[in-house]
Image (spheres, rainbow, N blue to C red):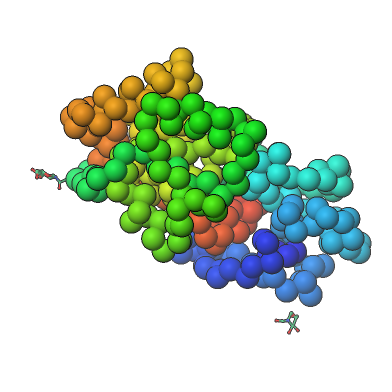
């Protein structure tokens, strides 16, 4: 049972047998099923404003209550309400009980020829929340002294959702600065904006092969990073190496909820 649609937005459900090859899953947002549900998924953002919005009433002892959250700790208020209420966690963190990342890579059965989208521009960054005091804006202010960066988002160049991939794919590099730095917190900024559009993101380990990204902490300064990006810009052979991993790996991003919502069913079946 989905206690409340995440962000109050009803999403299309799909059969878990099609998505994950598992059977006997029934997912509903109809609260009449509360007493019968093996699990109740509670999305943090939709209940954190008041404990009154949490599931009410006596809870069947065999029911699993699942805390679901995809936001980083900096954007997850009132965590204290949630103490001792849940049996399982479901989040982008690898140490959650049910791991629901924003995207992942899968090995292909056949190698594919990946063609790099045509590039006419150098560095892009799409940012909706522009905070001059944030580390990412301060880093940008330093970086822009050495290399031109096109900025998209609120108060900058417009980037409609349907134009996002075609616009960003013209750039050789994309800055995937998250709004906050936290363990495993890697959002669609990486999976969709950067990898989905065929640019080279500039952050990360663990989730990606080392030749798929450039990490800013490998450079002593923004100037050093700018120099490196300019070198790559002039050296197509080295730039192309950042795409070799795509011969054997394909991107699966999870912008839709359907797979996430099947994961608890899979986890409970596997635990039986
Ligand atoms: C919710 O489920 C109950 C019990 O199966 C059913 O009677 C009711 O019509 C459902 N409500 C909606 C909105 O589907
Ligand atoms: C879930 O946690 C509650 C409260 O701690 C507990 O009473 C219940 O037995 C747990 N349910 C399961 C299925 O483990
Ligand atoms: C990839 O492209 C090369 C050169 O065009 C070709 O020789 C090779 O067979 C292609 N490989 C695949 C897996 O399509």
In terms of image quadrants, where is residue 264? bottom right
Image coordinates of residue 247 in percent, x first then y, are 25, 40
Q: Which residue: 86% across, 42% down?
A: 80
Q: How many marks?
A: 0
Judged left or right of residue 56, residue 28 is left
Q: Is residue 92 above or below residue 181?
A: below
Q: Could you tell me which quadrant the N terminus lies in?
A: bottom right
Q: Is residue 11 above or below residue 158?
A: below
Image coordinates of residue 201 in percent, x first then y, are 40, 37
Judged left or right of residue 30, residue 199 is left
In terms of image quadrants, where is residue 147? top left
Q: Which residue: 46% across, 49% down?
A: 152
Image coordinates of residue 256 in percent, x first then y, are 52, 60
In terms of image quadrants, where is residue 27? bottom right
Image coordinates of residue 194 in percent, x first then y, are 40, 44
Q: Is residue 193 above or below residue 41?
A: above
Judge by depth and name the residue closer to the eye, 163 or 13.
Answer: 163
Judged left or right of residue 94, residue 159 is left
Give the residue at the far top of this rendering. 220
Q: Which residue: 63% across, 70% down?
A: 10
């Amino acid at each position: 049972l989905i206690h409340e649609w995440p962000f109050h937005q009803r999403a299309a459900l799909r059969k878990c047998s099609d998505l994950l090859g598992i059977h006997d899953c029934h997912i509903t947002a109809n609260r009449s099923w509360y007493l019968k549900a093996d699990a109740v998924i509670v999305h943090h953002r939709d209940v954190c404003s008041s404990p009154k919005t949490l599931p009410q009433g006596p809870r069947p002892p065999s029911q699993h209550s699942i805390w679901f959250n995809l936001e980083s700790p900096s954007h997850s208020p009132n965590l204290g309400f949630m103490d001792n209420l849940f049996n399982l966690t479901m989040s982008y963190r690898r140490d959650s009980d049910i791991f629901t990342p924003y995207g992942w890579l899968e090995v292909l059965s056949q190698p594919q020829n990946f063609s790099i989208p045509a590039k006419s521009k150098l560095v892009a960054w799409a940012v909706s929340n522009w905070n001059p005091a944030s580390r990412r804006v301060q880093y940008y202010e330093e970086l822009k002294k050495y290399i031109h960066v096109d900025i998209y988002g609120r108060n900058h160049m417009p980037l409609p959702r349907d134009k996002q991939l075609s616009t960003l794919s013209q750039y050789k590099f994309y800055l995937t600065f998250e709004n906050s730095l936290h363990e495993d917190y890697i959002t669609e900024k990486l999976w969709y904006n950067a990898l989905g559009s065929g640019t080279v993101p500039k952050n990360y380990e663990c989730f990606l092969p080392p030749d798929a990204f450039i990490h800013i902490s490998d450079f002593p300064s923004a100037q050093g990073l700018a120099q490196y990006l300019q070198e790559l810009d002039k050296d197509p052979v080295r730039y192309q190496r950042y795409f070799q991993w795509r011969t054997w790996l394909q991107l699966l991003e999870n912008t839709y909820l359907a797979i996430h919502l099947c994961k608890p069913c899979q986890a409970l079946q596997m635990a039986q």
